[in-house]
Amino acid sequence: MNIEDYRLYFNYRIILKTASKQKGLAGDSFENNDFYAIFKAEVENEINLLYKFKIKPVKTSRLINYYGKKSLSPALPQFLHIYDKADVFDAGGSLESKIRSADGIFLTSSRFEGAKIYKPGADIFNNLDLYLSNAAGKPKFDFICVGTNSEAEIEFIKKFSGNPLLIILPSNPLPDLTALNKTTPNFLHISAIDPFSKNSKYGFALRNSLAFHLSQEMIVLYLSEKSSLSSIIKKFENAGKPVNIFERGYSTYTMAPDKKPDISNTVIKKEYNSIQKFIINSLEKENITIDNLLKLSNIKLNVDEKEIIKAISILEMNSEIERRPGGIIKKI
């Protein structure tokens, strides 16, 4: 980062802390404000921590064209954060030559209903290898974007050969990278989430928005019948970006798309704890923003906010609810 970029990032972090909506504050007029002096030392400490852990802030516009005007909701931030354990970032050529907007592919997967573990078989990985390479055996895509939220994604990362570039997109602030560092080849880790944020309620939406802008195509290793991936799949399809689904599931079954089992007489009993029941019942009549759902749950149930967030996440993984743009929670 040059001096000007550093100054822009410094001011950006102070604005985040003040949640200031004032416009036109720049140069001396911005730096002479009281809130600048209040947060100066705190921001310097944060930036030192980023460099210590090899996390590099990069202007989003360096990697994504028109990110401000054409972003999915919630809009991408002004800066992204890149974790670069192997110095791929600095190894020959500019960053823009390695990561260009819509030159990659986004690979992800559902879980089984009930958050049961799904791991792709050898046949899926063989077909995937063939799909990702051209007739000469060279990669079709400049890079592959993948999350770490399902066992299928973790399994792919473990088996990944290192060509083309692998970009891991997290959905939570400062995730634990210990296991990845031990099992994966060189990779970049790009986050649209503030690394010092104390919650990740918009984590999936920001992750999906970043994946959409970086990728020209989407691959789904496994898609459950009611999946939280439905929203981002529609975004890709509406933008004319192909979506390739390798394996589809119906209920807890897995089979080829043309062999859907007859489960018309099967009754699947869903069991919820008290928090999950309250959330489902609250969404029966209307959609609610996650902030209002948290407030309502706190008032009615008097439980820790972390337990509510956990219940929301489990229901989302179970394809019972989905997060929509703007932080809206909807019952599927």
Image (cartoon, grey):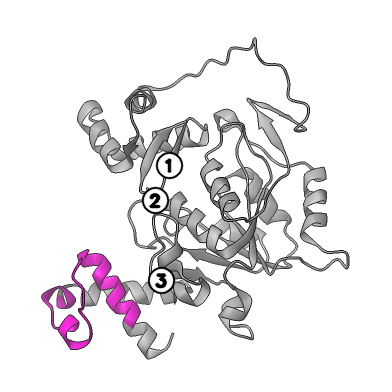
Q: Amino acid at mark 2?
A: Tyr
Q: Secondary structure at mark 1?
A: strand
* Residue stretch rendered in magenta on the structure: 8-37
Q: Quadrant of residue 124?
A: top right
> Which residue has dot 3 on it?
79
Label of residue 8 in the image: none
**Image point (67%, 32%), residue name:** 249
10 Å neighbourhood of mark 1: few (<14), some, or many (≥20)? Answer: many
Residue 314, compared with residue 106, is above or below; it is: above
Q: CA distance from mark 1 to mark 2?
A: 9 Å
Label of residue 202 in the image: 2
Q: Quadrant of residue 185?
A: bottom right
- State if disc 3 and disc 1 touch (CB < 8 Å): no
Q: Secondary structure at mark 2?
A: loop
**Mark 1 or 3, closer to the camera:** 1
Task: Please state which of residues 196 and 166 is positioned toward the viewer in this rendering.
Answer: 166
Q: Amino acid at mark 1?
A: Arg
